[in-house]
Amino acid sequence: MGSNLPSRSPYRHPTYDDTPGDEDADVVMPLSSLFLDELREDDTTTVYSYYSTWSTNYTMSNLVGPGRLLGNFYSRAGRSLEKRLRRVVNRAAIKEYKDAVGVLQSANFYATFDSDDPNEHEKACKALLTCARPRLLRRSYGLLSIGHQNSNLHSEACLSNIRKSVTSPPCSRGSA
């Protein structure tokens, strides 16, 4: 096509040995399309380099000024808030887990399935699911037991209670 014709472009075409850098930001690589040749010849065409696409509002962390101070303040405040929220959520999960283990270890846990009250059934199922959750998470995501040494024992107790509940449904125990 037009690749054999000399270009009328004011831009210098690099050879294969040339590599465009900062000083050659106005260099356009040769292409064989006539449309692109016309665009190269147009005076309104703007050539962008890699460095010209960066935003001018970008602030480096080592520049002195109010932006850096506010950025550091918000960064520290965010880390502190995340840390506190993580602690609150962890404490709530530990409390919920201990309550569920207490329900499972109570003597009348299986009697809750014999009752006609659906709220009691729901409470027992929540306790079973709460105890099963850490074990399932460790198995699914390969997480290690963090925190209490006996949490694994509680998980085993919960899972054995789940197995017993599944193998002997409440209807068959109530009629026997």
Image (cartoon, rainbow, N blue to C red):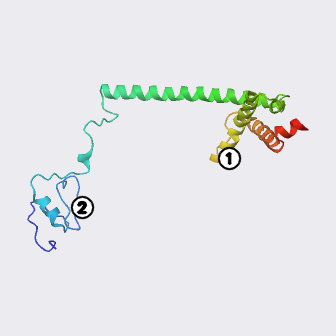
Query: Could you tell me if residue 11 is visible in this image?
Result: no
- Residue 171, how many percent across, how many down? 83, 38
**Which secondary structure lies at badge 2?**
loop
Query: Could you tell me if residue 175 is visible in this image?
Result: yes
The picture quadrant where one finds residue 112 is top right
- Residue 63, how many percent across, how many down? 30, 32
Apparent side of residue 110 relative to residue 92 in the rendered image (left or right): right
In the rendered image, which residue does mark 1 sit on? 139
- Residue 157, how many percent across, how many down? 80, 38
Tag 1–tag 2 contact (CB < 8 Å): no
Residue at 18% from the left image edge and 59% from the top image edge: 28
Q: Quadrant of the N terminus?
A: bottom left
In the rendered image, which residue does mark 2 sit on? 19
Viewer-side residue, 114 vs 43:
114
**Which secondary structure lies at badge 1?**
helix
Apparent side of residue 27 relative to residue 103 in the rendered image (left or right): left
Residue at 10% from the left image edge and 62% from the top image edge: 9
Specify the amino acid type for callout 2.
Answer: Thr
